[in-house]
Structures are given as C-alpha cells and as structure tokens.
Amino acid sequence: MEKNIAVIKGDGIGPEIVTEAMKVLDKVAEKYGHKFNYEQLLMGGCSIDANGVPLTDETIERCKASDAVLMGSIGGDTTKSPWYKLPANLRPEAGLLKIRKSLGLFANLRPCLLFSELSSACPLKKEISDKGFDMLIMRELTGGLYFGERHTEEVNGVMNAVDTLKYDEKEIRRIAIKAFDVAMKRRKKVTSVDKANVLDSSRLWRKVVEEVAKDYPEVTLEHMLVDNSAMQLVKDPAQFDVMVTENMFGDILSDEASMITGSIGMLPSASMNETKFGLYEPSGGSAPDIAGQNKANPIATILSAAMMLRYSFDMNDEADAVENAVRQTIKDGFRTGDIMSEGMTLLSCSEMGSKIAEYI
Ligand code: NAD
C-alpha cells in the first residue's frame, strides 16, 4: 500500500521524536512492502519564524490532501520565548486549535496503557498497578460545554455567569460510531460516561449511544456516571476498554487516566474526523527543558504512529508489530531518562528509535 503522510515535526523535542517515529515507519514499510511518502510541513513556533503565523492555509490544504498527519509537538518556553510576546491568535498553540477545527477533528483518542515493567511509576496501590491496564478514552472535541453559548452579566447588582452544555443527536451519533468502531479493533467493550441522572444533554447522549450500539452486537455497552467513572479509574482501571464521553468530562478523565500511567513520554493520542483521516501526536508538549539534547522519549510518538497504521490505514498487523516492538524494548530493560530505573540500560532518543525499529 502507498500512503501520503503529512509530517509536522514542530518545536522543541518535536523534530527529535518524530524523526524516530519515521524511522520505525520506514522499517514497517520495508518489512510489509508498503510505501510511505512524507511531506514535511511547518506549524507552531517554527512557522511563526518562517511565515509570521503559527499555521498557514497552505499547510492546512497540504494536510487535507494527505492520508494522515503525524505531528510532534509545538510551542516553546512560555516564560522566555519571544513567541509568547505575540497576541494570543499568533502564538504557537493557536495553530493547534486551528488545525483541529479546519480538519474537522471531533474525536480525540487517548490510549492509557500501563506496561507492567513500568508499574512502579504508577501512583496507584501495588495490587492495582500490578494488574496493569490498557484502555482508551474517546473524548468529544468540538461540542459541549466548551463550545456552548456563554456570557457574564450583572443582574440586580450581582454578577452572573452562564455556560451552556449543548449537543445535538448528530454530534453524539458520530462520536458514538467512532467509539464502537475503535472498540471493534480492541476488546469490544464501550463504557459511555455521562451524568444522565441530572443533565438533559446526558439523557440524549445515553439514548443515541444505545441506538448506535444496536449496529454493533459484538460490542458490550455499559453506561457509567461521570463521578463514578472518576472513582473507578483509580480503583480498577483494568475494567475499561473504550470509554466515550463528552468534551469536558473527557478533558478531566483523560488527564486522570494519563496520570495513573506515570509517564507522559509514553502516551500517544489521535484526533479523527468522520472518515479514517486523523492527526496523530504524543500527549506531551515540546519539552523545551530537554529539547536538542537527544534525551526525549520517542515512544509516545512511535505509538501514535502505530495508531495511524491501525485507525487510518487499517494496517492492524503492522500496528501490532510496532506495539509489540515497544513492549519488547521495555521488557528487555531499555529506557530513556524519563523512565529510567536502577539496573536498566539508558538510551538516547535516537537509540531508542533504532532499538524499536530493530525489534520490528
Ligand atoms: P511538556 O509536556 O512539554 O513538559 C512537561 C514535562 O514532561 C517536562 O519536564 C518535559 O521534559 C517532560 N516531557 C514531556 N514530553 C517528554 C518526552 N517525550 N520525553 C521525556 N520527557 C518529556 O509540558 P509543558 O512544559 O507544560 O509545555 C511546554 C510547551 O509545550 C509549551 O509551549 C506548551 O504550550 C506546549 N504544549 C504543546 C502541546 C502540543 O503540541 N500538543 C501539548 C502540551 C503542551
């Protein structure tokens, strides 16, 4: 198969970690007889330096013309970089919001996986972390409370502020379909998180999710209230496979879930639209404190590339090969600095990429 990948290396550690993900993709291409064509594009601080804006229309068009986007991270040191003296709409992060909107990326997928070899980094009780967990949070990204009408006004001398949580059934249906599609590629269980005992928007959410579930008889559906979900995540995360939820609930729960995995350098993510198109990036930022030192952990970006293979290209065996290579590398005791512990072998960013490519 031949695929065109738009590559946005970005700022800080971005170029280092994306280079390693490309190294692994090239190995996959060689082994499985595919051809990946890369087009390198600028976004974030490097685009501000080159073009005066964090994201050009040309870059958006090139991304749209590709089969998927692989991204590093963007932004710099927010206290020192001159990028942060610019107006908010010209700062590096403005590019992120614009690209997600322009590409219609409404579903954010964040796998949270605890490797048993790294369970000491997990802040949960040992009997829970020893079991490990492998779940994926799917957050609705373009609706709900963050995009509803809002205003602040004074009423009879008292300040009032209003935010609106609105979803229409189409918005719920498309994210539910995405969740069930992803569950079909995993352990076939969906937990839909809402607050249906209080909120109308949640009651509609629950009704539409149940309708969608009828088309996926192999997938088990359960509903869980958001407050209970927050508790269950720290009590028994192994019970979850795919958790689907609205924007704000997902914002909070996905941060909670990433915290219990212990290391930001290990967490991939994807944002997808209605088609198989997606933007794949690590969950962490540009880590300016270690940029340019060949110290960053490229695993989150390499696992993001594996998600691209699985969800955009339907290359399941290839995605398994990448994930297994990462698992074997960790099992054999190879570590970057952020996950280093006694008795393990310390690798640089580029050495880690080479080791994983070697294991493909
Ligand atoms: P950060 O995630 O960049 O760094 C937090 C800490 O985690 C740092 O100590 C860093 O060294 C470490 N870290 C992060 N990724 C790592 C990796 N792959 N390997 C090893 N260590 C890693 O968060 P921050 O410091 O709050 O933000 C830095 C910049 O990144 C800011 O400009 C911020 O706006 C931007 N940012 C971008 C994205 C994105 O591109 N999607 C996301 C978050 C933050």
Image: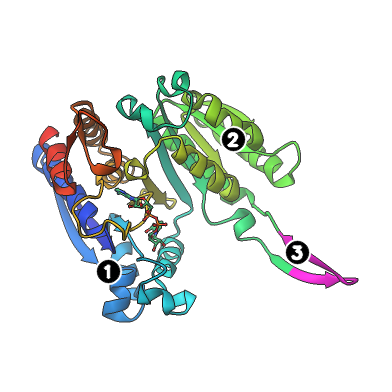
- Residue at (18, 58) in percent of width and height: 38
Work out which quarter of the rendered image holds the N terminus and state it.
Answer: top left
The image quadrant of residue 164 is bottom right
Foreground residue among 230 and 65: 230
Q: Mark 3: few, some, or many residues within 10 Å (few <14, many ≥20)? A: few
The image quadrant of residue 152 is bottom right
| As drawn, 73 above or below 257 | below
Foreground residue among 234 and 174: 234
Foreground residue among 179 and 87: 87
- Residue at (34, 68) in percent of width and height: 44
Q: Amino acid at mark 2?
A: Ala
| As drawn, 279 above or below 228 | below
Give the CA separation, mark 2 to mark 3.
26 Å
Residue 6 shows in this picture: no
Say which residue label 2 marks.
Answer: 230
Say which residue label 1 marks.
Answer: 42
Q: Nearer the viewer, mark 3 or mark 1?
A: 3
Residue 200 picture location, percent across and down: 74, 45
Residue 271 in the magenta stretch? The answer is: no
Position of 207 compared to 63: left or right?
A: right
Q: Main secondary structure of the magenta part?
A: strand
Q: Which residues are magenta?
A: 152-163
Residue 155 in the magenta stretch? The answer is: yes
Say which residue label 3 marks.
Answer: 161
Residue farthest toward the right in the current orientation of the protein: 156
Foreground residue among 41 and 128: 128
For marks 2 and 3, the one nearer the N-term is 3
Q: Secondary structure at mark 1?
A: loop
Q: Secondary structure at mark 2?
A: helix
- Residue at (44, 69) in percent of width and height: 94
